[in-house]
Image (cartoon, helix red, strand yellow):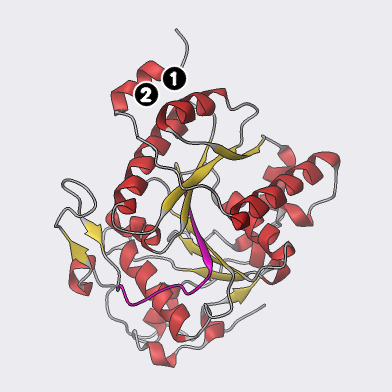
Amino acid sequence: MNIPVRPPQASKPPQTCRAAGFLDEGGLDGEGSVQVHLDPSVKLGTAKVFAIYGKGGIGKSTPSSNLSVAFAKLGKRVLQIGCDPKHDSTFTLTKTLMPTVIDVLESVDFHTEELRTEDFVFQGVEGVMCVEAGGPPAGTGCGGYVVGQTVKLLKEHHLLDDTDVVIFDVLGDVVCGGFAAPLQHADRALVVTANDFDSIFAMNRIVAAIEAKAKNYKVRFGGVIVNRSEGSDQVDRFNEVVGLNKVAHFPILDAIRKSRLKKATLFEMEATPEIVAVQNEYLRLAETLLAGTEPLTPKPMKDRDIFDLLGFD
């Protein structure tokens, strides 16, 4: 769907968290925390909300987009929100790099009443609604502010009233309180990891962030998605120690790499046996998440302890 966007106008600089009134340094989310606290009156309604995290470059957008399609194929009305300034979370769904929420807000000088739904929402494969939050230029603002504004816009335009599932695809493994903001809306947080030390090391830090948020919000850990990995022995070892479980496993397949190049979800690829197996794994994961996963309360490890746990002697 080709949505026209108004040409840029003179705009206000993106607000920082402190200027927007969202910055809290009271340590509610852990000792020494500096977190973004969103407007508590803004709720996501009755939708099941999932926030997907993982090490930068691990391939979160592929699981996010294919999981969105799987939910849609199960008859659910799905909204995927990309939370990366690169705004590439949804391009396999929409076949384009969409304008971001921050783009369209700037184009109307932050007068939200001038925005239309089609200015920032595109319809993708299987009817999945797609939004890219975007973000301020590097070093100039806070992604948490943009997430908050995105949710407010969705509420103002009543786009959440009839939504069954919301997926936040979140930027990397940054420690910024702003990019932890989706955890304030989510029911379950999922982490995408590979079966290697660096990915698991990053996952451990994400686990700590999720557990900090769980002290004050409803979010709970939903499980681990193993991606781009033939095996999962290292992930399984880590999970057993900290109290996590694996909810899905996607192998290294050239067809998955090609799907990104073709700007296509895996459900649009030629139905070879290996692709059908991956499609079925996404459908199984979607069914599992809809049925409701047990809330996990993992205990993250000390950074140095991971060196002793993983690897070979």
- Asked whether residue 95 is in view, the answer is no
Query: Does the stretch in magenta take in 42?
Result: yes
In the picture, measured across the screen, residue 157 lies left or right of residue 229, that is left
Q: Nearer the viewer, residue 126 or 243?
A: 243
Give the labeled residue for mark 1: 310
- Vertical placement of residue 217 versus 302, above or below: below
Position of residue 99 in the picture relative to residue 283 (left or right):
left
Look at 33% across and 41% down and name the residue there: 208
Residue 102 in the image: state x and y as whole percent: 40, 73
**Quadrant showing the C terminus:** top left
Callout 1 secondary element:
loop
234 or 141: nearer the viewer: 234
- Secondary structure beneath dot 2 equals helix
Q: Is residue 7 left or right of residue 184?
A: right
Whether the residues at callouts 2 and 1 have beta carbons within 8 Å, the answer is: yes
Q: Which residue is mark 2?
A: 306
x, y percentage for residue 142? 29, 63
Q: Which residues are magenta?
A: 40-53
